[in-house]
């Protein structure tokens, strides 16, 4: 899988790290809401880290979420994720 592929309709790709508390919180919320996601650890995938940096003014800020329409959000709320998927 290429880390830059767009997620399937109704799902997201979440770029994260293992130590990120905001990432863990969002994953728990997504699981509870039944929203599908693919998680990509930017520390294990340098190309994903580069993508995240390109979306965040050079910063590797996580969680960064990629939506099926190609748009992205940094540290979005569950409400924002839901609204952008509908």
Image: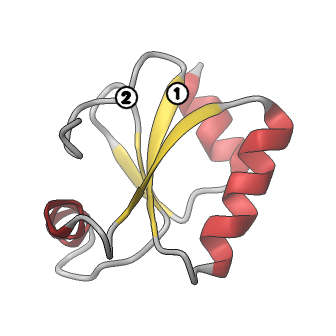
Residue plotted at (72% across, 43% down): 30
Q: Say which of 66 and 43 sits in front.
A: 43
Q: Quadrant of the C terminus?
A: top right
Lateral position of residue 62 relative to residue 27, left or right: left
Callout 1: 10 Å neighbours few (<14), some, many (20+)?
A: some
Q: Is there a contact, CB below 8 Å, between mark 2 and mark 1?
A: yes
Rendered image: mark on residue 11: 1
- Vertical relation: 20 (above or below) 74: below
Secondary structure under tag 1 reads strand
What colour scheme has been applied to the protein in the rendered image? secondary structure
Q: Tell me the residue at 49%/65% (across/down).
A: 63
The residue closer to the viewer here, 66 or 45, is: 45
Q: Residue furthest right?
A: 32
Residue 19 x/y as whole percent: 57, 83
Coordinates of residue 21 in the picture (x, y in percent): 67, 79
> What percent of the width, then of the height, locates residue 78?
71, 48
At x 69%, y 67%, the residue is 24
* Residue 31 x/y as whole percent: 77, 41
Does 80 sit above or below residue 15?
above
Vertical relation: 7 (above or below) 14: above
At label 2, counting other C-alpha atoms closer than 10 Å, the crowd grade (few under 14, some 14-19, many 20 or more) is: some
State the separation of the CA atoms marked 2 and 1. Answer: 6 Å
Quadrant of the rendered structure where residue 34 is?
top right
Q: Which residue carries the number 2 mark?
A: 7
Quadrant in the picture for residue 73: bottom left
Label total for image: 2
In the rendered view of the protein, which quadrant contains the N terminus?
top left
In the rendered structure, find residue 53 and report the number of the disc placed on it. none
Q: What residue is shown at x 23% (from left), y 46% (from top)?
A: 3
Left or right of residue 83, residue 71 in this image: left
Q: Quick check: 71 above or below 21?
A: above
Q: SS of the residue at dot 2?
A: loop
């Amino acid at each position: 899988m290429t880390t830059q592929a767009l997620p399937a309709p109704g799902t997201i790709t979440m770029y994260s790290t293992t130590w990120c508390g905001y990432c863990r919180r969002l994953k728990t919320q997504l699981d509870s809401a039944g929203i599908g996601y693919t998680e990509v650890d930017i520390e294990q995938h340098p190309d994903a880290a580069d993508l995240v940096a390109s979306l965040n003014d050079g910063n590797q800020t996580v969680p960064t979420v990629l939506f099926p329409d190609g748009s992205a959000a940094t540290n979005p709320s569950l409400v924002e994720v839901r609204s952008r998927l509908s």
